Amino acid sequence: MIAVVYSGSKNACWKIWHEGKAMVETHTLSVNPCFNDPKQTIQLLSKNITLIRNAENIKKVYVFAAGASAKEKQLELATTLERFFVNSKVKVKDDVYGAAIAACHDKSGIVGILGSGANCAYYNGKKPEKNNYGLGYILADEGSASYFGKILLKNFLEGKLPADLKAKLDHQYHLDRPSILERVYKKPQAQIYLASFLDFYSENRDHKFIQQLITQGFEKYFSTYLIPALAKHPGEEIHFVGTVAGHFQEQLREVAAKHRIEIMSVTREPIHNILNYYIN
């Protein structure tokens, strides 16, 4: 029995494979080692009945997690997970590696991540090229769910939202300045809070103002991540992975077309492709 895990900065998706078939899929909060200490990770796993029931029978765990680019973070997370999956060998790579496998398999290409966070990397068919991205939701993540949440709240607090959108936001979330600032600056896991507003974007995707925010966010992503990567590796196929890319694929392709860039594939949930890669 093996488990494959793909974890962004908000959620982690788990698939367990046993005797020739995908036995079960489950979800937890992120296992990002930059945001969770070992105790927190064990606690969140211990709340998941599916993982508890299968923990002793799983022999291998392949983990692809945001925040796990550094070797010491990979080792820390692997050691933590082996405390929970007591009979298992755990291998940890970062989420970019997992996205590259999901999108490209054994072929080269440029892989863009647009999920709860944002990143981009050239993949040579074996491993992603190191870059200076992956700086997190405070310093970067342009075009990600956490970025869009931040921009939405900023417009709300500055009184720039159209009246109809403000009314919907008030009705659904009951927001005010003190509660927003406390949630963002004083409470833990602000990135998850910010990313949660992607649902509001999806529900109001036809609103002109929301469409403008999405287009502007994608333009920032292209100028910050994709265009520099393409300039360094011209002619490579371009793939996207992540919930934001999946939810707003049409607008993503429209922005790409403005830059004369063709997107070969968009994979909303990479976990399925990653599992197929390892079992085949």
Image (cartoon, helix red, strand yellow):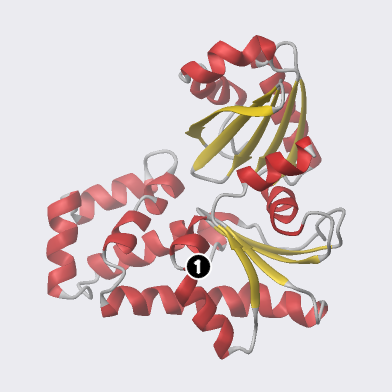
Q: x and y percent of residue 76 in the render?
A: 72, 29
Say left or right for 280 vs 242.
Answer: right
Task: Return the residue nearer the eye: 61 or 179.
Answer: 61
Say left or right for 129 vs 16.
Answer: right
Q: Secondary structure at mark 1?
A: loop
Q: x and y percent of residue 88 in the render?
A: 75, 17
Q: Residue at x 21, y 56 (%)?
A: 177
Q: Residue at x 77, y 82 (%)?
A: 231
Q: Quadrant of the N terminus?
A: top right
Q: Residue at x 60, y 39 (%)?
A: 32
Q: Residue at x 79, y 75 (%)?
A: 236
Q: x and y percent of residue 168 in the render?
A: 15, 61
Q: x and y percent of residue 274 in the render?
A: 70, 44
Whether residue 66 is visible here, answered yes or no, is no
Amino acid on which the number 1 mark rests in the picture: Gly
Say left or right for 236 vs 253.
Answer: right
Using the rendered view, name the quadrant where residue 38 is placed: top right
Vertical comparison of 76 with 239: above or below: above
Disc 1 marks which residue? Answer: 143
Q: For the view shown, which residue lies furthest in the front direction?
A: 20
Instruction: Report how many numbered discs are placed on residues in the image.
Output: 1
